[in-house]
């Protein structure tokens, strides 16, 4: 007999922290050392998708307030992970981009996270790993369709 949504939610809330702790055992980087928050890391990752962003476009894209985005960008700039400059034609326009160091930090975090995932999931069979990925992909596809196809 399957679990209902409430029981599933209870069990997942209980298990996910253990899973993330196991994956994180292989990480020692800007995020795990507390130099930047997970949210700031997500903004950094977002910045990596373009050469540069207009600040207002970035704020709309990450769906946060101007003050929150400014604080996150300030912290990334202070760590040398992002840069910010004003437009040449219109000084009111602020542009933000990821730096070389920011790209290196992203690469380091992804490599370490992948290592943790490999170490964790090698304990499962190939079929179990495929089933896990199939479920995650199905969930992501359903989330994308709820957002109107925008991922």
Image (cartoon, rainbow, N blue to C red):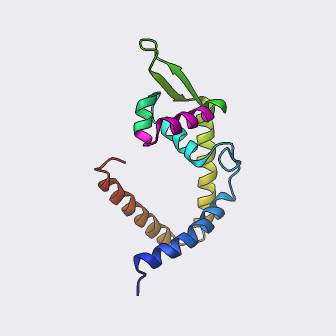
Q: Position of residue 14 (x, y in %)?
A: 57, 72
Q: Position of residue 31 (x, y in %)?
A: 65, 47
Which of these two is toward me, 66 or 145?
A: 66
The majority secondary structure of the magenta stretch comes to helix
In the image, the segment drawn in magenta is: 61-76
Residue under the image location 46 percent in, 15 percent down: 91
Q: Is residue 124 magenta?
A: no
Q: Considering only vertical position in the picture, is 117 above or below 81? A: below
Residue under the image location 46 percent in, 29 percent down: 55
With 58 as the anchor, is 44 left or right in this view?
right
Residue under the image location 52 percent in, 39 percent down: 68
Q: Quadrant of residue 145?
A: bottom left
Q: Position of residue 13 (x, y in %)?
A: 54, 70
With 114 as the anchor, is 131 left or right in this view?
left
Q: Quadrant of residue 72?
A: top right
Which of these two is toward me, 73 or 27?
A: 73
Quadrant assignment for the N terminus: bottom left
Q: Position of residue 112 (x, y in %)?
A: 64, 51
């Amino acid at each position: 007999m399957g679990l209902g949504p409430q029981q599933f939610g209870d069990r997942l809330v209980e298990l996910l922290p253990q899973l993330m702790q196991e994956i994180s055992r292989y990480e020692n980087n800007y995020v795990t050392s507390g130099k930047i928050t997970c949210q700031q890391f997500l903004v950094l990752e977002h910045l990596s998708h373009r050469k540069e962003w207009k600040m207002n476009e970035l704020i709309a894209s990450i769906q946060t307030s101007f003050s929150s985005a400014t604080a996150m960008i300030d912290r990334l700039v202070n760590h040398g992970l992002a840069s910010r400059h004003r437009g040449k034609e219109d000084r009111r326009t602020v542009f933000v981009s990821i730096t070389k160091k920011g790209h290196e930090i992203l690469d380091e975090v992804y490599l370490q996270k992948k290592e943790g995932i490999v170490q964790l999931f090698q304990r499962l069979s190939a079929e179990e790993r495929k089933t896990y990925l199939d479920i995650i992909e199905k969930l992501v596809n359903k989330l994308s369709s709820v957002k109107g196809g925008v991922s």
